[in-house]
Image: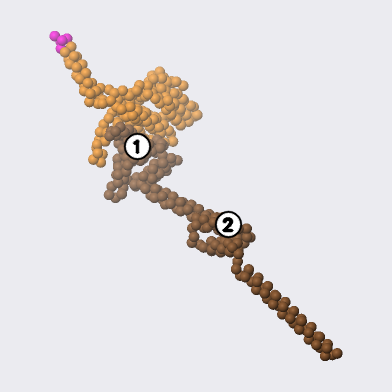
Amino acid sequence: MKSIKYIFTGVFLLFLQLNTQLFAQTNEPELAPGRKAAIDSLALEKVRDLSKYISIIGDKETPFSEANRVIERAMELFAEGAQMGVSSLNSQEVKYYGVRTYFRRLMALNYDKVKISWFNIQYISDLERQPDGRYVGVITIYQKFEGISEDGMKYQDTTKKDITVFVERKQTQIGGRLIGFWDVLLGDIRVSETTQ
Amino acid sequence: MKSKNLLNNFHLNRSIFFLAIVIFAGLGVSSCKKQPSSTVPTAEEQRIEKAKADLRALLNDNDMSIEEMENRLDAIKALNIEDPEVVSLIAQVEAKIARLKAEKLREEEDARRRREEEMRKQRESEPAYKLNSYFNRIAGAASTDESNFQISQALTMFSSPEAPVLIIIAKDGDIVDYDEPTTINKYLNYLKDQKKKADAIENIVFDDNGKIKELELTKLR
């Protein structure tokens, strides 16, 4: 009797999900190629913006107040609860921190000079529309980290990271007009490999 | 004998007298015949004199247009007069025309420069131009202090640092897609941080005090 109840619940949930998917698909027309290209490009731009913010936050030349301001701007790029993976050549372990904690740690790194740059920023999984209407994709980046300590010791690594990107169309009212905009949010940033 | 000599002398003197009269009369006749040729000029002489007069008029006239002057000069040159004075006058008129042309060209160039300068001043006084200049100065500032100063200056153009900034990313018929709306304060700081070229200005909405209350940018240009 109990198993029949579970099967019934399962079938009901499956039906509900299918129904939701159908509803989402029928109510949201496919994006024209031009519009899709625009949101692809917008998401890439947000990742590049993050790259610049990270280099500013990590740079020891950046004044404290400026770094804090930039952290707030960088935080706006992330979805609630997003995490950042951190790796090191000295350890097999990849640690995950909430992005704010990651930025604070980055700012406080015990190096005299820090240089962080991102390169080869590209999609490894194109933005695909989900049943809920959001677009989800994965962008990969390579991060080159260089840290020079006070005694001149240099640490350097290159990390490949995968960033989940969520893009959602929203509406807001500005100056009496209804504005349709694309909200791009970055999700977890996962480390996929670390090399020297 | 003496009376005979006197008579002979008298005859001689009379002959000389008549001869002198005849010569004088002959001279008089000949001078009378030549006179008409110097007072009534030939057609060629008249042509030359007219050309000289016309050329002098061209030299003295300061109101005639360059085109008219050139036309008249061309007409005179077409006569192919080889009189040295005419040739000299033609050269003087040509020099005058060349000088007037150079002056006209300089005046036109000056006028063009003045127009461009006025347009530049007008453009620079336009809010879009001023704002774009601030965008460039903020993104290209050599220091944080410099970019912060430029931001504070740019913000004086706005009704509030919170004035909304909309950025168009795509257009498809009536559908306009925007990036997430931001504020001018955030956008200016974004330019400072990212050091990249600002999006093009699409539209500016002013309040009653002439301050910008809404800014629309576009990535489509």
Q: Which residue is mark 1?
A: B218
**Viewer-closest of B148 and A171:** A171
Q: Main secondary structure of the magenta part?
A: helix
Chain where mark 2 sits: B
Q: Is residue B117 visible?
A: no
Amino acid at the residue labelled 1: Thr
Foreground: disc 2 or disc 1 = 2
In the picture shown, does residue A116 fall above or below B88? above
Q: Is residue B170 visible?
A: yes
* Colour chain A is painted in: orange
Label number found at residue B79: 2
Across and down, in percent, residue A130 comes to 27, 22
**Viewer-closest of A151 and B170:** B170
- Span shown in magenta: A1-5
Secondary structure type for disc 1: strand
Q: Is residue A3 magenta?
A: yes
* Colour chain B is painted in: brown
Chain where mark 1 sits: B
Label number found at residue B36: none
Q: Residue at x 31, y 49 (%)?
A: B210
Secondary structure type for disc 2: loop
**Viewer-closest of B200 and A90:** B200
Q: Is residue A64 magenta?
A: no
Q: Residue at x 35, y 28 (%)?
A: A37
Q: Quadrant of residue B197?
A: top left
Specify the quadrant that holds the N terminus of chain B.
Answer: bottom right
Q: Quadrant of residue B168?
A: top left
Q: Residue furthest right?
A: B1
Amino acid at the residue labelled 2: Leu
